[in-house]
Amino acid sequence: MKKKRFIIVFIVIVALLAGVFTVSAKTFQNNNSNEVGYTLKSIYDKMDDGWLYSFEIAYVENDPNIYYIFDGYNLKHRPSGIEYYVSYVDAETGKELEKIPSRYATLSTSEKYREDIKKINDFFNQSQFKQNISIDDLEQLEVENISKEYLVDLFNRTISSEIKNIPGEYISAPSLEWKTQTSTDESKPGEWQIMYILDYGYIQDIEIEFVNSDGTYLSEQTEKLDFSSADNELLENIETLEENIITSQNVNITTSRSDRNLINNSDLNKLLNDLNGYLLENN
């Protein structure tokens, strides 16, 4: 078939940009690494509405180059349609063959930001900066939707950050993923959703959300007059639980009496336990 002649590529190093590469070894080696890939340095900035921006400096197996990776990940809103997509391209002609909806909302798969992200990553990977930079160093970089001042600040914090040399417990688990659990409470139809991002096996951030059956989020109902005190308490407990998970680096709430009593919801507890099993199974 004609289609077999095509080599399908997405040239922005999507596996790296989307943070979905996995690691197969639990040791850190700068040279001759047997790992699929690992982050050497990274900084994450929590933005608005579930977004997490990051700059990562990473290695890939059997590749002497150091990769500089800027991207943003939304841990709250799952994409729909092709606002976020992976581009399948004919390697011979450069023609885009198909837009495949992305499972994750990231800047690198965004209709609006994808070209900027490609330019930024191409520029930094060609420049291979080894120390702090200034705005003058980005003079040749042309972007429309990302602040150069922000890039300078984020990169400088990254290059000055501590080198990672001890991998976390979930080193082989997928680095970006979401799981859901349908609500069994007839008075509260919808689903529980958890999305996380891992960095070198550590839980960098996790978002726990309740999505109502109409697609709205419980966490966005605070401005409504019918927002109940019970819902408010639930959201406060969820925020505490998220902080505890990141601090303890443990999704299994059954190991903590305080977390066990924090969320008295069987659906969410089941989802957390299922996620813990998933992470360990894929580790």
Image: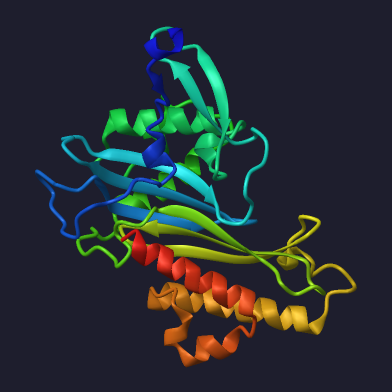
By what rule are the colours in the image chosen?
A: rainbow
**Is residue 210 something one can see in this rendering?**
yes
- Camera-nearest residue between 33 and 192: 192
The residue most toward the right is 225
Q: Quadrant of residue 135?
A: top left
Q: Quadrant of the C terminus?
A: bottom left
Vertical order, 81 against 182 (above or below): above
Determine the residue located farthest toward the left in the rendered image.
Answer: 32
Q: Which residue is located at x 47 percent, y 81 percent?
A: 253
Residue 194: where, in percent of width, then height?
56, 63
- The one nearer the camera, 62 or 48, is 62
Residue 213 lies, in percent from the top left, at 78, 59
Q: In this orientation, does residue 134 appear?
A: no
Residue found 39% across the figure and 8% down from its top: 92
Residue 239, compared with residue 180, is above or below; it is below
Q: In which quadrant will I find the N terminus?
A: top left
Q: Position of residue 182 (x, y in %)?
A: 67, 64
Q: Viewed as shown, does residue 190 lie left or right of 64?
A: right
The count of marks equals 0
Task: Pinpoint residue 267: horizontal percent, then vertical percent.
Answer: 63, 74
Quarter of image, res 128: top left
Q: Residue at x 52, y 72 (%)?
A: 272
Front residue (pair 208, 268): 268
Viewer-side residue, 2 vs 15: 2
> Which residue is outermost to the front?
1
Q: Is residue 234 above or below residue 42?
A: below
In the shown orientation, is residue 30 left or right of residue 236? left
